Image (cartoon, rainbow, N blue to C red):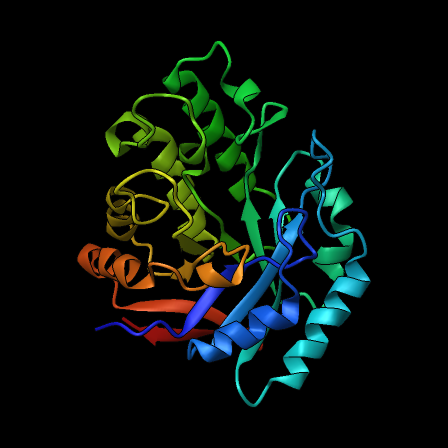
Amino acid sequence: MFKPVADSHTHTDFSPDSETPAEQTVLQAIRLGLSHIAITDHFDPKHPEDYVGIENPRLYADTIKALKQKYEKQIYVSVGVEIGYTPFTEALAHDFFVNPDIEYIINSVHVISGYDGYNPAFYAGKSRDQAYNEYFSTVLDSVKADYRYDAVGHIGYVERRAPYENRRIVYEEFKEYIDKIFDVIISREKILELNTATSVPGLVCMPAPELVKQFYKRGGRLITLSSDAHNLERIAENFQAAAQVAADAGFRYFTVKENGKFRFINI
């Protein structure tokens, strides 16, 4: 049975939607027996609802780096950030991209066509195909972005709050975008996260298992497990089920970054 040892996506009270102290996140990861925890708080420049997240990049980096040093004999604490892609991201997130203390950057899409995918206004008057195609178009732009990042976050984000009867993303329906997105991720040697923070009944992770299989078929080998936890209870949540999805697709290891290098974890 797979034993979770790393969580590559967690949030603390540096994010606007979490009240969890960063040190408590690290201690919970240690209690769970993890050997790697990435603290990746939100930074969403120009978010239409002022959902920016980290306000003081230096304070944030210094705080997580201090925890990294304090607990280095018990766990590897990765100083990370989740960048919310917009066309303005490159200039406005400059401090993160050049700060050597930020060692792990997740490149995610939250804002599509001026609205967060959590906002019902994004879907108003749009068919499922229209909304999802707009989302995938933005994801494709994000993975092509000319800035430093290490991983691509929660592909399938719109599934969480879409108002449609069938929220699931089906590969055959959007394969033109999905293939292009995967090809860019693979060619740029970025990590694809299997994000277990889903809200669709029966869906283990994002991307969905069908998409994970396609990523492997196209040559993708760098994947990681991410809880997207905003509280202690959800750290490493459903990792065994997500590991089975990865194994069924053909993957034999997960990838994390430590000290600037890939570390491979057998499934």
Closest to the observer: 226 or 33? 33
Q: Residue at x 72, y 42 (%)?
A: 52
Give the quarter of the figure containing the N terminus: bottom left
Q: Is residue 35 visible?
A: no
Q: Quadrant of residue 95?
A: bottom right
Disc count in the image?
Answer: 0
Q: Residue at x 81, y 63 (%)?
A: 58
Q: Is residue 48 above or below residue 237?
A: above
Q: Is residue 228 above or below residue 69?
A: above
Rendered location of residue 211, percent (x, y): 29, 43
Give the quarter of the figure containing the C terminus: bottom left
| In the image, farthest residue toward the left | 248
Please state if 107 lies on the left or on the right of 161 as rendered. Answer: right
Closest to the observer: 153 or 184? 153
| In the image, farthest residue toward the bottom | 73
Rendered location of residue 66, percent (x, y): 72, 78
Q: Is residue 68 visible?
A: yes
Please state if 248 lies on the left or on the right of 227 as rendered. Answer: left
Q: Quadrant of residue 47?
A: top right
Q: Quadrant of residue 111?
A: top right
Closest to the observer: 251 or 204? 204
Rendered location of residue 110, percent (x, y): 56, 37
Q: Residue at x 27, y 34 (%)?
A: 171
Please state if 130 lies on the left or on the right of 251 as rendered. Answer: right
Rendered location of residue 145, percent (x, y): 59, 43
Closest to the observer: 192 or 159? 159
Q: Is residue 10 above or below residue 256?
A: above
